[in-house]
Image (tube, rainbow, N blue to C red):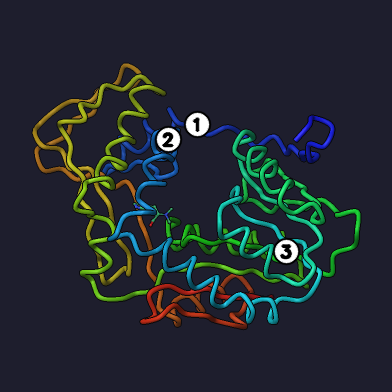
């Protein structure tokens, strides 16, 4: 695409992450914790891409097949002429399936904190969907985002949040995110959300403990990223990946477990790890219908349609205020 045809970017100048402050606060906490949002540097994003193609990681594959199969019904349930607002930079197969399948989508707005990821995604999509106006917004989608007005009037906003990314937020944070989504889409809006469903423990745990060890490498890459970006001295060989399902909280909890007594230094401060000490690094919530409906309800929304993959392996939910 030439520079003149580049879609206009709305830059809300999101506050950059305080990676050093978050690392120091997480290491000072009991138990120790680090935010999973820092998994996604260039190497982490590559490893996540590999995870989505692993035989054990059913989520991406099953959600894609579900979206494809349910698309005619989704297009009927979603009001015509929507302005599609995706949380995160889409451009992959899920976004394409949605834009191809909906009735006369007017505009497409990915909301993404990384300008480069955002522009790369809309550049690709603009070529494929010349009739859909591309209106990318650089912003933090955990806050309400003023969505740009398309030049042709859209009947309503459809927020698209696939991938069970909601599951990576704590219950309180997921509630806040849904409330802010509600504010972003307005009273006439709808939201299509992908959620992983509670199923047998073996299947869920295997998805986060693949035989090839890609997920372990993905988790450990967090420490390599911190060593590079905040100058810490984590010894990657001194930690191991641990992911297990905790039924009382309906979530996979992922940890990095210290293999020995050791000190880690960050910004001139030392943090002691005991042998066997587990540092929490990610939650991946799984939902029952009742739990998800309650979460949506707390955010002032109700589930108006639901589509499940075979054997209830994954779900898509349409929400409205
Ligand atoms: C992005 N997110 C929904 C993934 C998940 O399943 O929680 C991240 C992931 N972590 C380990 N494997 C995949």
Q: Residue at x 81, y 69 (%)?
A: 81
- Dot 3 or dot 2, earlier in sequence: 2
Taking the image as shown, residue 282 lies to the left or right of residue 68, namely left
Badges 2 and 1: C-beta atoms under 8 Å apart? yes
Q: Position of residue 72 (x, y in %)?
A: 64, 79
User: Image height check: is 98 above or below 46?
Assistant: below
Disc 2 secondary structure class: helix
Taking the image as shown, residue 251 lies to the left or right of residue 140, namely left
Disc 3 secondary structure class: helix
Quadrant of the rendered image containing residue 155: bottom right
State the CA–CA distance, disc 2 to disc 1.
6 Å
State the CA–CA distance, disc 3 to disc 2.
30 Å
Taking depth in this image into account, of 277 and 73 the one nearest to the observer is 73
Q: Position of residue 184 (x, y in %)?
A: 71, 59
Q: Which image quarter has ligand 1?
A: bottom left
Q: Pointer 3: what residue?
A: 185
Q: Pointer 2: what residue?
A: 22
Q: Position of residue 90 (x, y in %)?
A: 60, 51
Quadrant of the rendered image containing residue 71: bottom right
Mark 1 burial class by Cα count in 10 Å: few <14, some 14-19, many 20+: few
Q: Which disc is residue 86 wearing?
A: none
Q: Residue at x 64, y 69 (%)?
A: 191
Taking depth in this image into account, of 136 and 38 the one nearest to the observer is 136
Taking the image as shown, residue 88 lies to the left or right of residue 280, namely right
User: Image height check: is 26 above or below 64?
Assistant: above
Taking depth in this image into account, of 162 and 287 the one nearest to the observer is 162
- Dot 3 or dot 1, earlier in sequence: 1
Q: Residue at x 9, y 38 (%)?
A: 275
State the CA–CA distance, disc 3 to disc 1.
28 Å
Q: Pointer 1: what residue?
A: 18
Taking depth in this image into account, of 10 and 298 the one nearest to the observer is 10
């Amino acid at each position: 695409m030439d520079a003149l045809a580049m879609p206009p970017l709305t830059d809300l100048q999101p506050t950059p992450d305080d990676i050093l402050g978050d690392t120091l606060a997480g290491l000072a906490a009991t138990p120790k914790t680090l935010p999973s949002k820092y998994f996604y540097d260039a190497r982490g994003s590559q490893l996540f891409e590999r995870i989505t193609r692993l035989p054990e990681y059913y989520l991406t594959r099953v959600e894609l097949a579900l979206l494809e199969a349910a698309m005619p019904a989704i297009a009927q349930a979603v009001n015509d002429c929507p302005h599609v607002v995706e949380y995160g930079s889409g451009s992959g197969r899920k976004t394409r399936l949605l834009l191809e399948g909906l009735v006369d989508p007017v505009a497409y707005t990915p909301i993404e904190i990384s300008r480069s990821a955002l522009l790369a995604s809309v550049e690709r999509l603009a070529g494929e969907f010349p009739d859909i106006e591309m209106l990318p917004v650089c912003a933090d989608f955990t806050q309400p985002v003023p969505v740009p007005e398309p030049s042709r009037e859209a009947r309503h906003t459809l927020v698209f949040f696939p991938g069970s990314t909601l599951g990576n937020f704590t219950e309180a944070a997921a509630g806040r995110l849904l409330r802010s989504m509600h504010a972003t889409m307005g009273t006439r809006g709808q939201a299509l959300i992908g959620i992983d469903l509670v199923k047998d423990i073996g299947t869920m745990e295997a998805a986060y403990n693949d035989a090839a060890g890609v997920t372990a490498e993905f988790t450990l890459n967090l420490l390599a990223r911190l060593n590079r970006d905040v100058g810490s001295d984590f010894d990657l060989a001194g930690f191991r990946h641990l992911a297990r399902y905790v039924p009382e909280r309906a979530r996979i909890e992922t940890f990095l477990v210290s293999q020995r007594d050791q000190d880690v230094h960050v910004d001139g401060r030392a943090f002691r790890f005991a042998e066997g000490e587990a540092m929490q690094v990610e939650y991946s919530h799984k939902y029952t219908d009742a739990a998800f409906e309650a979460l949506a309800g707390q955010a002032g929304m109700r589930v108006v349609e639901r589509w499940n993959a075979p054997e209830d392996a994954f779900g898509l939910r349409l929400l409205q205020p």
